[in-house]
């Protein structure tokens, strides 16, 4: 610690170089923090106490195959099931296809039991929605996006189903995902001439421990029917969509490695330059009685201060910046949140530390073991 | 008077380790830029290359995609017999009624993805001459047989000739592998229309692909189909229909630019660092140049050129690093159809050129401030030192 002033003086002797290097590293670590956050958000969809108790049951072949609504009563009879919604991806067009947002026709009997706090609304709004067959509820962000008020008429033209629905906004909900719209499946089914199909079932179980058993029993129920099911946790269901994106993991990790390699080069270059310029000084230090490991320690700490400093600025900068913007607006609802986790921050700090050690390692070691006479004689 | 280039080259050689490291750093940036562009380009060109002139895709009115479209089979005859549909020498209209369904199937790597199955008849092959069987044979009617694209076969479990896939109720045998010339059909499985309609219990068509006699006929047909309220269908140019699906790459595109800009800024600072250090250690030299009569302007441009050479070396290095990825096949989700689309990284000369331009921008931006510093050196001070 007593060498701290010495360290700082050295850092500030070429302020521009220190600053350029640190900024370059900060920008790179900002990028790495962003990419790691994309990855972690994709791999960890937001969960709530309620979502952990939900299972999703879809047709075994694919989501494109629909399930008869008659499945509902059979699933309800499975022990451990406390609530059930039949749901359907409506994919309607609101005014123009570019206004895309998720829309679900959903059975409303157990809606608020199944979703709990994930659809937070006033009791009055809930009641108004349940009473109105052509009512709908929308997430806060979605309502804000189009400036909807309660009582708003919303007209959706089906792009998968040949029907049009005219809905009245009866409630605006808050929760982890506020970009969707729900309306009554009964209304949809009537418009479809009592077609009696839904896309998937959302099943609420009494406790998390029961979930795997319930999933198995549900699938066993329909194993040999014309509409066999595949039941999994809601999280696994969402991750299934993410895996459709392809090998994002590989793409992002290879880009991160490229970036890390590039900043190692940048930092190594800086340290090599700054150590080379100081060969004589280092000789003097050693002549004064500094030990080899002390010199090595001084030079390494200097590099680490720059790289670690840069990485902290970059990663914390990312955290601050992203906490002040709403990712669901920027990504059209694809990412619900964008939170730079403590793990990501720690990893970035570790990268900063590692880059400092690796980049300064060779030049510092060379400088530290150079014989005093040699160093003092050397003219730079 | 201009300072000879040789001076810059030799100066870089003097600091070769530092110069090389900076160049590799810029090279990595350029390589990532090229790879992201190649990814977008590969995905886009899959869609752009799909389709023939005067071919129309007919969907249910309001449907945005084949996977979200279905209509009664009886309408098919109405459409194929319309005036303006091209006929073959035997008088048969060139129109193919097709059904599209999706299965969720495991990739070789383990996780599952959605894959599109197209139920077709003989006519589908005639309207898409790019689809060629490269292994095995075509499927036969009524036997629950499949042909699979080469790309799918390389990427998904049990999609090789002779293997059997279990779908819902029945077992389907893979009897052939086809290639479709890098088009969107390279991400599909094809089977007999009746077999698919039966298995899925959907006696409907998802789409009709037809060939119009000429561009005017195509326009007339589009209008005719749209105006007929009873059939409630809509026709699109096949090319335009697939081009619209390039929205799939919007996310990658945005990510790519974001990464390129940030890495570009980082590399710019690195180049600046390198050039400042070059200028500062060559004060005496610069002073000498000035004393010899070189103008400030010449010195300025000389250092910018030096930085440019450094960056361009990095740019070329980046191109070399990225090139091996060309042709690598990969896949992502087409969110229009909710199914997997397979494509190849496609590095074109234009993308390489863009990479070099990117490197040049990094070099110039990184070199300009240090070069100004060099040009401002005061002769008296330096030579007295």
Image: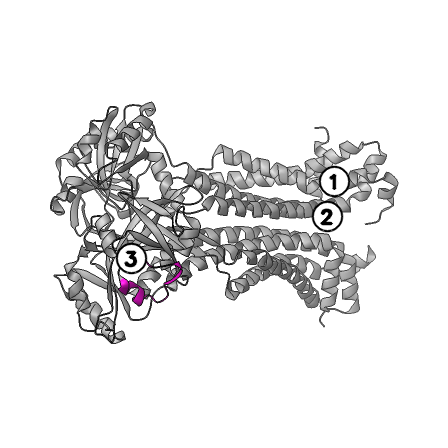
- Magenta-tinted stretch: B122-140
Tell me the CA gap for discs 1 and 3: 73 Å
In this rendering, position of residue B164 left or right of residue B362 = left
For disc 2, the marked residue is A273
Secondary structure found at label 2: helix
Secondary element type, mark 1: helix
Relative depth, front residue between A353 and B282:
A353
Front position in the image: B90 or B22: B90
**Magenta span includes A175:** no
Q: Name the residue under label 3.
A: B140
How many numbered dots are placed on residues in this image? 3
Quadrant showing the N terminus of chain B: bottom right
Q: Which of pointers 3 and 2 indicates the residue nearer the eye? A: 3
Q: Position of residue B5 (x, y in %)?
A: 71, 67
Is residue B138 inside the magenta stretch? yes
Image coordinates for residue B247, horizontal then vertical, percent: 36, 56
CB under 8 Å between callouts 1 and 3? no
Residue appearing at x 49%, y 32% in the figure: A342
Q: Which residue is labeled 1 in the image? A: A364
Q: Residues within 10 Å of mark 1 (few under 14, many from 20)?
A: many
Chain identity of mark 3: B
Please name whichever residue, B44 or A130, is drawn nearer the observer in this view of the structure: B44
Query: Which chain does the residue under circle 2 lie in?
Result: A
């Amino acid at each position: 610690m007593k060498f701290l002033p010495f360290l700082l003086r050295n850092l500030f002797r070429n302020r521009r170089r220190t600053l350029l290097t640190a900024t370059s590293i900060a920008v790179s670590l900002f990028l790495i923090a962003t990419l790691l956050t994309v990855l972690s958000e994709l791999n960890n969809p937001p969960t709530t106490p309620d979502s952990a108790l939900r299972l999703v049951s879809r047709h075994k072949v694919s989501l494109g195959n629909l399930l008869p609504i008659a499945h509902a009563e059979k699933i309800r009879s499975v022990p451990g099931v406390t609530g059930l919604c039949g749901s359907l991806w409506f994919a309607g067009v609101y005014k123009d296809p570019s206004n895309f947002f998720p829309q679900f026709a959903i059975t409303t009997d157990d809606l608020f039991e199944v979703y709990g706090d994930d659809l937070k609304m006033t009791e009055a709004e809930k009641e108004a929605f349940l009473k109105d067959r052509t009512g709908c509820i929308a997430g806060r962000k979605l309502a804000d996006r189009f400036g909807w008020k309660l009582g708003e008429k919303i007209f959706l033209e089906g792009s998968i189903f040949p029907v049009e629905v005219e809905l009245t906004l009866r409630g605006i909900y808050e929760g982890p995902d506020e970009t969707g719209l729900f309306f009554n499946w009964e209304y949809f089914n009537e418009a479809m001439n009592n077609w009696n199909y839904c896309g998937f079932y959302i099943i609420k179980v009494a406790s998390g421990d029961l979930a795997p058993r319930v999933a198995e029993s549900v699938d066993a129920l329909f194993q040999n029917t014309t509409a066999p099911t595949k039941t999994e946790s809601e999280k696994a269901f969402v991750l299934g969509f993410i895996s459709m994106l392809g090998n994002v993991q590989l793409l992002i990790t290879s880009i991160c490695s490229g970036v890390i390699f590039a900043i190692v080069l940048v930092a190594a270059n800086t340290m090599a330059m700054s150590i080379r310029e100081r060969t004589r000084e280092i000789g003097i230090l050693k002549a004064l009685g500094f030990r080899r490991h002390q010199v090595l320690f001084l030079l390494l700490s200097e590099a680490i201060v720059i790289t670690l400093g840069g990485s902290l600025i970059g990663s914390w900068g990312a955290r601050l910046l992203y906490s002040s913007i709403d990712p669901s607006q920027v990504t059209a609802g694809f990412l619900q949140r964008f939170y730079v986790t403590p793990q990501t921050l720690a990893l970035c700090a570790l990268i900063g530390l590692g880059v400092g050690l690796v980049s300064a390692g060779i030049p510092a070691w060379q400088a530290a073991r150079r014989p005093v006479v040699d160093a003092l004689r050397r003219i730079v | 008077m201009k300072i000879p280039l040789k001076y810059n080259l030799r100066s870089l050689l003097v600091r070769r380790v530092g110069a090389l490291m900076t160049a590799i750093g810029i090279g990595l940036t350029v390589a990532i830029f090229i790879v992201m562009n190649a990814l977008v380009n590969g995905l886009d060109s899959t869609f752009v290359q799909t389709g023939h002139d005067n071919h129309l895709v007919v969907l249910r009115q309001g449907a945005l995609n084949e996977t979200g479209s279905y209509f009664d089979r009886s309408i098919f005859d109405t459409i194929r017999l319309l005036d303006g549909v091209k006929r073959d020498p035997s008088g048969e209209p060139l129109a193919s009624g097709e059904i599209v369904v999706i299965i969720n199937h495991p990739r070789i790597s383990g996780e599952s993805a959605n894959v599109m199955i197209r139920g077709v008849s003989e006519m589908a092959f005639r309207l898409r001459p790019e689809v060629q069987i490269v292994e095995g044979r075509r499927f036969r009617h009524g036997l629950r047989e499949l042909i699979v694209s080469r790309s799918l076969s390389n990427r998904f479990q049990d999609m090789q000739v002779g293997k059997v896939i279990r779908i819902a109720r029945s077992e389907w045998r893979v009897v052939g592998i086809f290639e479709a010339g890098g088009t969107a059909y390279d991400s599909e499985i094809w089977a007999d229309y009746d077999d698919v309609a039966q298995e899925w219990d959907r006696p409907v068509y998802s789409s009709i692909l037809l060939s119009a006699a000429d561009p005017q006929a195509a326009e007339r047909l589009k209008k005719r189909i749209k105006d007929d309220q009873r059939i409630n269908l809509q026709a699109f140019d096949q090319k335009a229909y697939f081009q619209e699906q390039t929205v799939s790459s919007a996310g990658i595109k945005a990510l790519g630019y974001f990464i390129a800009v940030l890495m570009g800024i980082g590399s710019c600072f690195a180049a600046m660092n390198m050039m400042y250090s070059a200028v500062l250690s060559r004060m005496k030299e610069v002073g000498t140049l000035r004393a010899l009569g070189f103008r400030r302007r010449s010195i300025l441009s000389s250092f910018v050129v030096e930085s440019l050479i450094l960056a361009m070396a990095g740019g070329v290095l980046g191109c070399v690093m990225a090139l091996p990825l060309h042709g690598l096949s990969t896949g992502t989700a087409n969110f229009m159809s909710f199914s997997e689309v397979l494509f190849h990284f496609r590095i074109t000369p234009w993308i390489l050129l863009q990479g070099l331009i990117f490197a040049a921008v990094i070099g110039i931006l990184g070199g300009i401030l240090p070069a100004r510093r060099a040009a401002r050196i005061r002769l008296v001070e330096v030579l007295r030192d």
